[in-house]
Image (tube, rainbow, N blue to C red):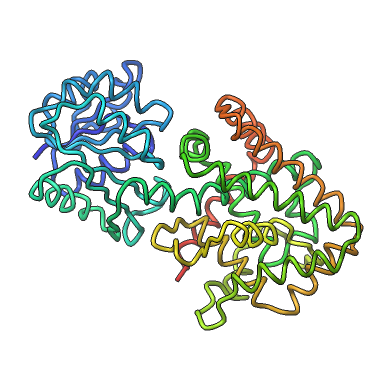
Amino acid sequence: MEIGIIGMGAMGKMYAKKLADSGYKINGGDIPERVDDLKREFEGQNVDILKDGIAVSRRSDLIFYSVPAGEIENTVRQYGPSTKLGAIVGGHTSVKTPEIEAFEKYLPRDNHIVTSHSLHAPSVDPLGQTMVAVNHRSSESAYQTALDIFGKLGSKIVEMNYADHDKATADTQAVTHLGFLSMGTAWRKMGGRPWENGTYVGGIDNTKLLMMLRIHGGTPHVYSGLAILNPHARMQVKQYSDSVSDLFGMMISGRENEFRTRIQEAASNFVQTESPILLDDELLGEYSLAGSGSERKPNSHLSLLTMVDAWHKLGINPYDNLVCKTPPFKLRLGIAEYLFRTPDLLEESLDAAINNMDLRTDDHQFSKAVLEWASVIEHKDIKAYHKKFERNRKHFEDKIDEGKELSGKLIEKLP
């Protein structure tokens, strides 16, 4: 059994190393200018770096396309027709609709299509993480072979079809990423260092900061592909932008009763008092970027109020999507749950939203940032998405590594 990986970026290399360690012969392929460096990197391991994707396709029994979602069709068009007779083919992209369409269009009919999605970053050990397996077009024996290989990663396998996968990831990841990216844009435009501001040193805000930094330490094409190419994502993004506009409009016009009523309606749909709470005070405050002695100040938590309102308006129960949870989504759900199930903190948040003028600039910048990101996604402008992402990353680059390290420790302690 030889496993081929077309696209030896961070995720492709992680799969290559893990599966080679499990005893499989790995054939890797990438663009010509990376071949020599990859050969040096994998020297002495059970990984052969071949000259291109055609060479990988001709000799491999199971092939992973580990390329950005925006490049999947062109890559499969180039290499798909060369796929070995009877081989199993899948992909690593976080949005499956374009991937399946490309496989159906360019793969020979004798190939089996069994694709997957590891719901974690390549820097996270797959052991115990969730992995979605999609049997789109395969014999029972070929599908079992793929599952056996997936199982070598130590992930928890969840089986579903590609349409359900894309709906679930749209419900969870698309708006989760939008929220954290918008926080980064708002803080960048304000020119400050949020970890030095007392408004952002509490447990909830510490988690926001860590996840904002973690996402900006990732690869922009992963997030843009999920938001722009997922056919279910744009509706969720639009509702989130509508919710933040509505709520911020009530705040600045002093419509407190209307504001509170809307949040209460959203809360009634969201709070599950019988379920165990995902996060607690100790875990939320354990890893902090703020210096010692920093004192927490009230915060409106507009990003979380908006998230819960959007879930309510869309009729989404976020707990239904824990099967497709990612660490950022689970943490965002956890801090939203913590806010809404801590009555004194929620009251402080609602009061700050309406009455604390010191927060008004922050909330204004956040609401503007959400609308900017939503517009980029609506217009399917991948170049603009990447440009905005890189601008944020440059602003926070001196803290990204620390944020990724601390957020990684926090993720390891998630229940």
Q: Residue at x 32, y 37 (%)?
A: 12
State the image quarter where residue 38 is shown: top left
Q: Please tell me whether residue 347 is drawn above or below residue 31 in the rendered image.
A: below
**What's the residue at 33%, 19% (across, down)?**
31
Pick the residue in front: 141 or 195. Answer: 141
Question: Does 366 appear above or below 101?
Answer: below
Q: Quadrant of residue 195?
A: bottom right
The residue that appears at 68% across and 46% down in the rendered structure is 241
**In the image, is residue 54 above or below residue 156?**
above
Q: Position of residue 250 (x, y in %)?
A: 84, 57
- Residue 13, image x and y in percent? 31, 37
94 shown above or below 66:
below
Image position, residue 46 (x, y; %): 16, 37
Quadrant placement of the N terminus? top left
Asked whether residue 94 appears in the rendered view, the answer is: yes
Q: Is there any visible trace of residue 46 in the rendered image? A: no
Which residue sits furthest top?
32
Residue 97 pos. (x, y %): 37, 38
Quarter of the image that includes the C terminus: bottom left
Residues 291 and 18: in front is 18
Instruction: Give left or right: position of 366 versus 103.
Output: right
> Looking at the image, which is closer to me, 137 or 364?
137
